[in-house]
């Protein structure tokens, strides 16, 4: 059974997929230098906002609201109602924080 964290995200991922809201990238370095958007690294940390029902023999480990670490190039970027999200397989998630 699919779970959603809030009604603002109107998407239900299928099977072993999850929808993650990436955390904001750092705006400044430790020395106070402002980094332009083109030079920022893609964040590898986010919050799970929707979870699929899992595979037949493998229930989902993550749940909505979990803070997770994922691979640098994991997932597909999607935009829903002006907000950016990543949709990825649960196996692309490296750790739950």
Image: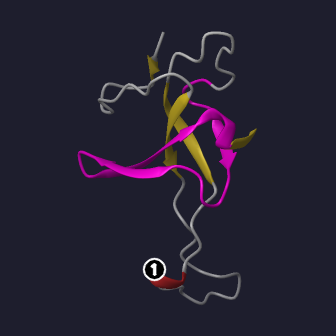
Residue 33 position, x and y percent, is: 60, 90
The magenta segment is 63-92
Along the viewing direction, whichever of 56 and 61 lies nearer the viewer: 56
Magenta region includes residue 74: yes
Would residue 28 be visible to someone looking at this image?
yes
Residue located 58% across and 36% down the image: 89
Residue located 55% across and 66% down the image: 25
Would residue 97 be visible to someone looking at this image?
no
Q: In this view, does 12 lie to the left or right of 35?
A: left
For disc 1, the marked residue is 37
Q: In this view, does 82 lie to the left or right of 29?
A: left
For residue 71, above or below residue 88: below
Residue 9 position, x and y percent, is: 33, 33
| Quarter of the image that includes the C terminus | top right
Residue located 53% across and 49% down the image: 75
Residue 57 position, x and y percent, is: 68, 10
Quadrant position of residue 7 = top left
Along the viewing direction, whichever of 46 and 79 lies nearer the viewer: 79
Residue 64 position, x and y percent, is: 54, 26
Residue located 64% across and 60% down the image: 72
Magenta region includes residue 71: yes
Furthest toward the front, the residue is: 56
């Amino acid at each position: 059974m699919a779970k959603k964290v809030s009604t603002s995200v109107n998407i239900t991922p299928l099977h072993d997929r999850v929808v993650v809201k990436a955390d904001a990238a750092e705006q400044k370095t430790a020395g106070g230098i402002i980094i332009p958007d083109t030079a920022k690294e893609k964040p590898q940390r986010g919050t799970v906002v929707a979870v699929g029902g899992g595979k037949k023999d493998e229930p989902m480990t993550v749940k909505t609201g979990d803070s997770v670490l994922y691979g640098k190039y994991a997932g597909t970027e999607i935009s829903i109602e002006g907000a950016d999200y990543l949709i990825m397989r649960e196996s692309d998630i490296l750790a739950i924080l």
